[in-house]
Amino acid sequence: MLHWLNRKNYDIAEKLGQFRFLQEKKEQGYAKRTGFPYHDSAALLDEILTAHPEVDVVLLQINYLDWDTAGIESGKCYETAVKHGKKVFVMEPVKGGSLASLPEEAEQILRKVHPDWTPADWALRFVQSLPEVEVCLSGMNTEEQVIANTKPFTPLTAEEVQTLFQVRDLIEQNTKVPC
């Protein structure tokens, strides 16, 4: 994988022929698949994947809180990768742990639907329910978290996704700083 593609680093990667290098390693049998972690707009991602259809996967920051966030564009980036036929690896599904510990009102909304699910369960199920997600990288600190993150799950229903977006809206309302 190329490291941290954004506008500045993409220009450097192009100048140095890094995509060609990855493709050569793949052709030589040193890599089965190639890709890159991505940190920029969906428009730039579309430009990169159009120029480099040989790339197999994209590592994206995806979680329900960032799905429609302008600076991250999780949803738009996911849709762009899918449009180009790429598999998606996910980073930050629990947003650095912040989606594992929600405000009480937000957690109560989730517990009404599934009393036995933790907020982290909801966050992981959200990204694991996206059809083109192949790998979900989640930070874990305890053996219990490892066990919880590897148990089988059923994809979220449309109603459950709407519940998460209701929670997202509540979190956003409580964290915005009026300017």
Image (cartoon, helix red, strand yellow):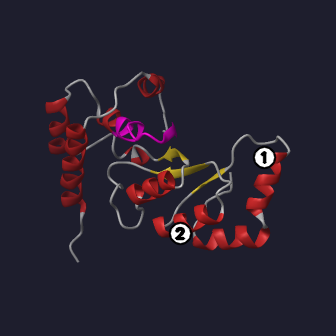
In percent of width and height, residue 103 lies at 21, 45
In percent of width and height, residue 153 lies at 37, 25
Q: How crowded is mark 1: few (under 14 residues within 10 Å), some or many (20 or more)?
A: some
Name the residue that disc number 2 marks: 44
Q: Is mark 1 on a helix, strand or loop?
A: helix
Q: Is mark 2 on a helix, strand or loop?
A: helix
Q: How crowded is mark 2: few (under 14 residues within 10 Å), some or many (20 or more)?
A: some
Q: What residue type is labelled 1?
A: Lys
Span shown in magenta: 123-136
Q: In this view, does 114 lie to the left or right of 148?
A: left
- Disc with the residue nearer the chain's start (2 vs 1): 1
**Vertical placement of residue 19 versus 94, above or below:** below
Q: Residue furthest right?
A: 28
Q: What residue is rendered at 47% in x and 42% in y?
A: 132
Q: Is residue 7 left or right of residue 110?
A: right
Name the residue that disc number 1 marks: 26
Identify the image quadrant of residue 75: bottom left
Toward the viewer: 103 or 88? 88
Q: Does the magenta stretch include residue 126?
A: yes
Q: Does the magenta stretch include residue 128?
A: yes
Q: Is residue 41 visible?
A: no
Q: Which amino acid does label 2 sit on?
A: Leu
Toward the viewer: 33 or 85? 85
The C terminus, quarter of image: bottom left
